Amino acid sequence: MTRRARTAVFLVLVLFLEGYALNLFAKESQSPYGPLNDEEKRVIDESGTEQAFTGKYTDLNLMGVYACRKCGAPLYRSDDKFPSRCGWPAFDNELPSAVKRSLDPDGRRTEITCARCGAHLGHVFLGEQLTSRDTRHCVNSICMVFESQDSKRLQRAVFAGGCFWGVEERMKNLPGVVCATSGFTGGRKANPTYKEVCTGRTGHAEAVEIIFDPTKTDYETLCMYFLEIHDPTEKNRQGPDVGTQYRSGIFYLDEAQKKTARKLLKILREKGYNVQTEVEPFRHFWQAERYHQNYYERTGKTPYCHTYQKRF
Ligand SMILES: [Zn+2]
């Protein structure tokens, strides 16, 4: 090889390594929680397992969202966490499309990974009959970061305004909204099905849970928009959908949300609206069946029941 050729090969190699290092840096810096330490790398990047009963979230029982340690995507909500006594945090449901399942290299178990970044999370087990969903996501604590309601990264808001397909569709693309999920809240029955809620006898309302980034939007903005995409003056109905499950409701997760909701409803009343929206304390969000999630985008249909109308 001539000297010139050697120099050229050397330069190409340097550029390649530089690009690789930059790429690595870019991937690392995507995490809102900083670079992984050695133990996190062992579990998250190399599909390791943390020792049972040592993880910080195994027995945590606080309201909030569990995000991916590696990329920050929301994965699980505290509502779906249950005590499994297995030594690791257990959830019987994941946020829609947040977790990918694949056959573990051991050929027996089902591995679960973050759908966004591929981070190893743990394994999912079916048929143990531990909860009504008969599913246990067994997740390493070290793979997640818990975000409570006063988090500066991920907070929740829960609204009921008639058919959840329309509310979800209208709100999911707002600036700062990370995730919008259709489900049920405000009733008595645990893990209700859509059919059960449709009878009007469970006490639940069709609702949408919004997970939002409080540095990019705020609760008041979301709440105002919610009150402008459905008709808050209708009682126990929304357009063609009639029944208590279609009632208008704001389910507050903390005192600040309650105050904001009441303030906005007062403004509407002062403007002459006969507001029927209930302001209720949030207790539990039950995610609806998979075929209700992202309904309009999946089916290509047009929302029939929710149009924007300026009220503030
Ligand atoms: Zn991730």
Image (cartoon, rainbow, N blue to C red):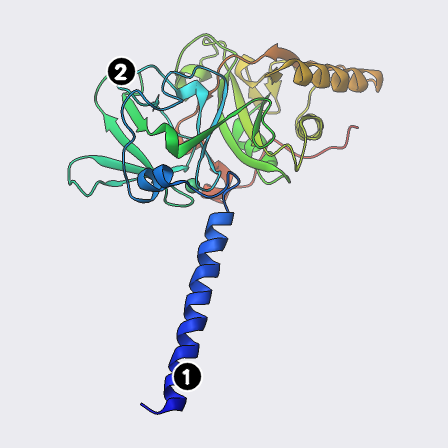
Question: Which residue: 42% across, 44% down?
Answer: 116
The residue sitting at 19% across, 34% down in the picture is 109
Image side of residue 283 versus residue 263, left or right: left
Dot 1 alpha-carbon crowd within 10 angstroms: few under 14, some 14 to 19, many 20 or more: few
User: In the rendering, which numbered label is found on residue 159?
Assistant: none
- Identify the amino acid type marked 1: Ala
Classify 299 as above or below 135: below
Q: Give percent across and percent down for residue 41.
A: 36, 42
For the residue with label 2, is its CB less than 8 Å from the closest atom of ligand 1? no
Of all residues, the one furthest to the left in this rendering is 107
Rendered image quadrant of residue 129: top left
Q: Residue tagged by mark 2?
A: 130
Q: Which residue is mark 1?
A: 8
Q: Nearer the viewer, residue 85 or 287?
A: 85
**Would residue 66 appear left or right of 241 to someone viewing this image?**
left
Q: Nearer the viewer, residue 272 or 42?
A: 42
Q: Position of residue 119 (x, y in %)?
A: 37, 42
Question: Splitting the image into 4 quarters, where does residue 59 fall?
Answer: top left
Ligand 1 visible in quadrant: top left
Query: Hey, what amino acid is under mark 2?
Result: Leu
